[in-house]
Amino acid sequence: MENEVITSRKIIYPGDMIGIIGEGRSSVQLVATAKSMGFKVATYVTSEKNEVSHYADASFIGSIHDGEKLQRFAQKCKIVLYESEMIDIKTIQYLQQFVSIPQGVKLLELNQDRIIEKASIEQLGIKVAPYVTIVDLDDLYESIAEIGYPAILRPILKDPLTEEGLLLESEMDLPKASPLLERGTYLLQSWMDEGDEVAVSVVKDQNHRQKMFPMVENIYQDHHLKETKVPLDVDPRIQNNLLEAATKIANFIDYVGVFSIVFYIHNDEVYLKRLIPGIHRSQNIFNLASNTTVYEETLRALSGMLISDIRLQVPTVMLNISDHQMQKIKTQWLIKDNWHFHFYPQVNENEDKAHIGYILADGDNVGQIQEQIDNTDIW
């Protein structure tokens, strides 16, 4: 049993137990959606001070390296799913000995090695931002001339729990890289800070059928996601290029469930930014904007159901709320009939308390909604 992987595809019915491992902010809504569809839910989290477990039918609390407890969790479930990329691949591979994990690990493996991710996408004929590998500080001084400023220095192997990167905006920033490069080989990549970010959410089922959610634009402020908009307002030629690139990548990826393909649009050219297995918070926009959600489609795909035909229902803007904005938010709470307020439960005691929820605002068109938002002077 030690070297076997359970890969059989199971049909999951109401009343069956599914397992969810992970404690991100998406976990609570995933549990709630699963229960509304009739499933029983077991969760595996690493901290007792975690509200995800309060919503579940069964809860396991332990280290991601606790083999005995992971085995008991797995054997209680018909399938197990991970809710985001914030998961250790070795943990998933261990669980696969005892239970079916339809998402698999191939997209995680691709996602967590930056060189493999970029090389694989380039082989599909899709552009990525210029990059080189860096082994020491001398290498960095030599390579920055090729890449140019601004540039971002990141480890080749991603560690979602301890990720550390360095933005290089001038030669004065280069010495700061010395302690990072002592840890191993890094990747230096051009930082495309001028241009638009577009995300395409894809759902694939166990029979390799796939559907796409409407493309969205993500807007950042101080390197944090501020706003997400749908529908996308770009030149039709660029939109066709985005769709073509997303389709190529989706066909290439071996995965069941929902994942994101994130692009840059820079000088009217399309570049891949990154791939995101599982659920990302920008996808909460579909809780209002479309006829189905990423939470429902994740569960439909993993349980053997047919995935939905996905349609845009209403133009929507999603805005993330920070703790310091709450006083002004309370004013809008009383006067905005088209704003829908959502606040995160505290699922992890170590969570960033600054980001506390989001607003979904709908209207006749994105421009009208944006004007209404700008007039509040909150963001």
Image (tube, rainbow, N blue to C red):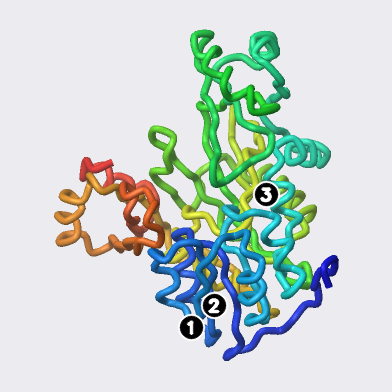
Question: Which secondary structure, mark 2?
Answer: strand
In the rendered image, which residue does mark 3 sit on? 243
Q: Picture coordinates of residue 208 (x, y %)?
A: 78, 67
The number of numbered badges drawn on the structure is 3
Viewer-side label of 1, 3: 1
Query: Above or below — where is 185 with respect to 136?
Result: below
Q: In the rendered view of the protein, which quadrant contains the N terminus?
A: bottom right
Mark 1 vs 3, N-terminal side: 1
**Is there a contact, CB below 8 Å, between mark 2 and mark 1?**
yes
Amino acid under disc 2: Ala
Determine the CA span between mark 3 and mark 2: 37 Å
Residue 42: numbered disc = 2
Determine the CA span between mark 2 and mark 1: 6 Å
Q: Picture coordinates of residue 56 (x, y %)?
A: 47, 78
Residue plotted at (56% across, 63% down) = 83
Determine the CA span between mark 1 and mark 3: 40 Å
Residue 321: numbered disc = none
In the rendered image, which residue does mark 1 sit on? 57
141 sits left or right of 353 in the view:
right
Packing grade of label 2 (10 A; few <14, some 14-19, many >=20) is: many
Mark 2 vs 1, N-terminal side: 2
Residue plotted at (22% across, 44% down) = 324
Amino acid under disc 1: Asp
**Residue 48 occupies quadrant:** bottom left
Please tell me which residue lies in front, 42 or 341: 42
Q: Picture coordinates of residue 249 (x, y %)?
A: 74, 49
**Residue 55 occupies quadrant:** bottom left
176 sits left or right of 188 in the view:
left
